[in-house]
Image: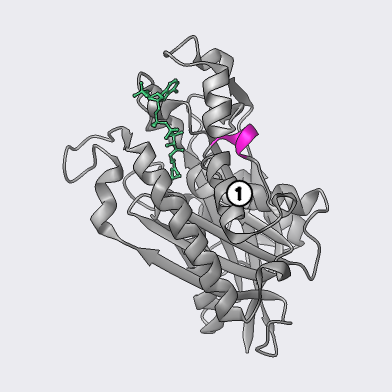
Amino acid sequence: MIRSVVAGCGSYLPDRVLTNVELAKMVDTSDEWIRERTGIVERHIAADGQKTSDLALRAAANALEHAGVKASDVDLIVLATATPDDTFPATACRVQAELGVTQGAAFDIQAVCSGFIYALATADNFIKAGQAKTALVIGAETFSRLLDWTDRGTCVLFGDGAGAVVLKAEQGQGTNADRGILTTHLHADGRFRDLLYVDGGPSSTKTVGHLRMAGREVFRHAVVNLAQVVNEALEAAGLSQSDIDWLVPHQANKRILDGTARKLNIDPARVVVTVDRHGNTSAASVPLALTEATRDGRIKPGNIVLMEAMGGGFTWGSALARW
Ligand code: UT7
């Protein structure tokens, strides 16, 4: 069977670092509260005029270089974002043009913080169906543009950034010894859409709007849904918790990462954590974490890597891969 093998990954973070101490001068919060409740110490913020596509392009170019793949070989670009440059066309099309790619499909996916998992599953299905051979899967966000900077309950949580992976079609045996993506599972339950949303949009208010969240409720659902989706992936692949070399979760809150690892009996030393330095970068958080752990030598070829995420919608899902 055809497998989508991760040939390389890359990332980009804007230069500007916003610390908790600076935030404490803007809203009624403290470095101590943010660290204790979220594990976040700092986050990156895009410069004025720096768009989601600018971040995405840098991450994509970085991933192509790491993979040793030429842009002209890319025949699919799937870009996950909830903060597109414009309402349309897709931010993926801008990235495609900037890379000089003129073949294949390019489109955006909107599943908020689960966006990268949704994008990875989509690209994997295109590759397995024989409709693409070399895919760029990107998660890129400028959430700073959606934040209400007077709302301490949300503005301290998010950051900007982008990450990308290159997937290549390779022949596998159809067993979990194959390299590449072994399983993906996607979920949504729109009944919970009002717990995490943006209060604007082209068809409702004709404005962009601001992010609104019932944090405690989202937290409660996240730990339950993420544990469930990890177990679902392991069961489908015939693997157990102890087979996971690296858990690469969406980075929303260190307490969610710890709670999920505890519930699943996974050694915290095998969980990749970037939330302390990146905050929650929505669809960019998983590929940012993947890139960090691959480049620093933690994730090695042959490792079992389990990615998971949960976000607005609610949407949630997992992707299990042998690196
Ligand atoms: O990526 C998509 C998924 N998103 C998430 O997974 C986020 C999930 N939620 C969370 O991470 C947490 O719920 C938060 C970090 C948002 C909040 O932490 P919490 O422990 O659930 O706090 P809380 O909302 O229950 O608020 C506790 C108190 C409140 O004060 P009172 O009502 O107890 O007097 C808040 O007003 O903390 C207050 N508070 C703050 N205080 C200082 C809320 N935000 C802040 C703040 N600084 N930034």
Depth check, front residue: 199 or 202: 199
Start-end of magenta stretch: 275-279
Q: Does the magenta stretch include residue 120?
A: no
Protein image colouring: one colour
Is residue 95 found left or right of 311 in the rendered image?
right
Q: In this figure, what is the number of numbered marks?
A: 1
Of all residues, the one furthest to the top in this rendering is: 25
Q: Residue flagged by tag 1: what amino acid is it?
A: Gly
Is residue 133 positioned above or below 117 on the image? below
Of all residues, the one furthest to the left in this rendering is: 204
Depth check, front residue: 322 or 126: 322
Is residue 153 found left or right of 54 in the rendered image?
left
Of all residues, the one furthest to the right in this rendering is: 297
Ligand 1 shows up in the quarter that is top left
Is residue 302 positioned above or below 11 on the image? below
Seen at 57% across and 18% down, the residue is 31
Seen at 24% across and 37% down, the residue is 199
Circle 1 is placed at which residue position? 163
Seen at 64% across and 33% down, the residue is 277
How many residues crowd around disc 1 within 10 Å: few (fewer than 14), some, or many (20 or more)?
A: many
Tell me, yes or no, if residue 114 can be seen here: no
